[in-house]
Every structure is written in C-alpha cells, then in structure tokens.
Image (cartoon, rainbow, N blue to C red):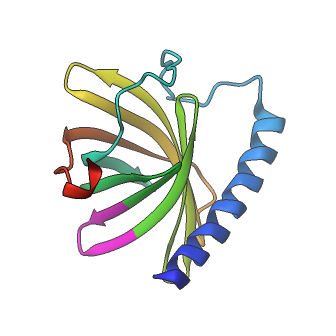
Amino acid sequence: MRRLVIVCAFALLYCLQIYAAVATVDAPRKLEGAPTLPKIDDKTPDLEGYYLCAGTDQGKKYSGLVTLRKINKVYVLQYQIGLAGYTGIGFRKDNTVIVGWSRGEVRGCYEYRISTTNSGPVLVGHWVSMPGNGELQTETLTFLRALPKDDDDN
C-alpha cells in the first residue's frame, strides 16, 4: 500500500507539472466540450460516496464504478473499469479535484470540475495518460449514494 501511495504521489506531481504548463500556455482558451460550471465554495456537500463513471478513451466509450473517500485533505479514488481496478490520490482546490493515478506501467491524471444536482455531486473532467495518445480524454463521475458511516466517524 505504501508503494502504491508513493507511485500515485509521483504521478500526481507529474500531472501537476503538466497541468501548470498547459494552464499557462492555454489559459485564455476554453477546452473544447468542457461545460461551464458554477464556482462552488467550501460549503459544497461532502464528495465522499459511490459514483457511476462514464467516459471516452480514444473515441471508445467506457463505464464503471468509483469509490471516493476523503482522508483529511486527501481524496482517494478507487476505480473499477471493467476488469481493471486502480487507485488514485488527489486534492481539491475550489471547484476542482486533481487526481494522479498509476496502473502497472501507465501513469495518468484527472482534472474534475465539481457541480451539484438534486441527486448529489457530479464531477466532469478530462484525463491524460502516458503511455497514451497524448490527447485529452473525457470522464464524468455521477453520484450514486453516500458511503456507509463508520463507528469511528463519531
């Protein structure tokens, strides 16, 4: 587990470097297909829960389940896409969640924008991976239900 956290931390650092470079170069341009979402303050409901994941990878659609947990200020996301399971770690800044992940030799990062609906949070974003095709892919996490409360949470 410690090795996984270290690998994810390095993947997150790598993604932040890429994000900083892209944000500087492309700051005035809106990403194609990215929805305009309202700014959300720190009063946004807790993001922890189970989510339906739907996205595209090089034009092919995929779906799966994601468990999102918060440990202090760190978000831990466990993805199950088909038979592939992997874990990412990230953080939240305003209405954005940045997540780095690793699966075998593949490293990647997500950038999700948070929006809310009557049913709960929706995280809409883009992701990249290396090795990969070098293009932004899309993904949406739609809230399904809250995590069960642990007795330790009291």
For the point 42% across and 35% down, which residue is it?
124
Magenta: main secondary structure equals strand
Q: Give the magenta range.
A: 78-86
In the figure, residue 44 lies in which quadrant? top left
Residue 89, above or below 25: below
49 left or right of 90 in image = left
Residue lying at the far front of the rendered structure: 154
Residue 120, above or below 107: above
Image quarter where the N terminus lies is bottom left
Q: Position of residue 126 (x, y in %)?
A: 51, 44
109 left or right of 86 in image = right
Counting labels gives: 0
Q: Position of residue 128 (x, y in %)?
A: 57, 56
Residue 106, above or below 44: below
Q: Position of residue 96 (x, y in %)?
A: 55, 35
Q: Is residue 33 magenta?
A: no
